[in-house]
Image (cartoon, grey):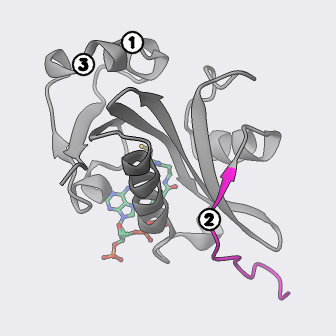
Amino acid sequence: MAANELIMHIVPLQRNTEIVTLLKSCGLSVEDLHENSRTQFFGLSSSSGLAGVIGVEHYGTYGLIRSLAVHVTFRSEGIGRMLVKHAEQWAKKQGMTELFLLTTTASGFFSRLGYTDSSRSDAPEAIQRTPQFSSLCPSSSQFMHKLISA
Ligand SMILES: CC(C)(COP(=O)(O)OP(=O)(O)OC[C@H]1O[C@@H](n2cnc3c(N)ncnc32)[C@H](O)[C@@H]1OP(=O)(O)O)[C@@H](O)C(=O)NCCC(=O)NCCS
């Protein structure tokens, strides 16, 4: 395979050091990603390593999208969008009907994918209790949601 050639197949991943390294290099929080974190990751790789990753935390019918990162080498090729779509499809299959996220950097990206601004005070309790919501993401983060049941 040529250098940096992408493997276009998205696969489920367990938290690993490659994920943590990519997230850190993109300035995203990893503090709550301990061994038994409830985050399900999905990612795709290139010949030189992990190209993109996304995580979903499952709370009954609600889900929290987090840890979306695409390696700088592979940005603007549609990978971010593919990862979000994949996470949404997986979430639907698990019975989730509404997804939430917090972002300081990518609200424009997510609004193009159908996510809309939401008030933090309207967040379901399970989402409010997540480390992302309660401590890791700054209060200036945009809180967004999307219904995925239709
Ligand atoms: C946000 C991110 C995941 C997008 O990944 P990507 O693979 O480059 O995204 P795509 O190629 O699917 O982009 C789709 C579109 O969104 C746009 N876009 C990308 N990042 C954007 C951002 N931060 N804000 C607004 N629009 C953005 C792209 O320009 C592209 O537009 P186009 O279709 O008109 O060219 C990537 O920029 C990244 O890893 N950023 C650093 C980490 C981060 O901020 N993650 C989000 C945390 S919630």
Q: Is residue 77 above or below residue 25?
A: below
Badge 2 crowding class, 10 Å Cα cut-off, few under 14, some 14 to 19, many 20 or more, is some
- Secondary structure of the residue carrying tag 1 is helix
Circle 2: residue type: Ile
Q: What residue sits right under mark 3 in the picture?
A: 124
The image quadrant of residue 104 is top left
CA gap, disc 2 and disc 3? 29 Å
| Location of the C terminus (image quadrant) | bottom left
Q: Closer to the camera, 43 or 149? A: 149
- Secondary structure of the residue carrying tag 2 is loop
The image quadrant of residue 72 is bottom right
**Residue at disc 2, CB closer than 8 Å to ligand 1:** no
Would residue 44 be found to the left or right of residue 4 on screen?
left
Circle 3: residue type: Pro
| Location of the N terminus (image quadrant) | bottom right
Picture residue at 50% right of the left edge, 78% below the top? 77
Residue 64 highlighted magenta (yes or no): no
Q: What residue sits right under mark 2 in the picture?
A: 10
Residue 136 shows in this picture: no
Would residue 50 be found to the left or right of residue 80 on screen?
right
Circle 1: residue type: Ser
CA gap, disc 1 and disc 2? 30 Å
Q: Percent position (x, y) of residue 114?
A: 20, 57
**Residue at disc 3, CB closer than 8 Å to ligand 1:** no
Q: Main secondary structure of the magenta part?
A: loop
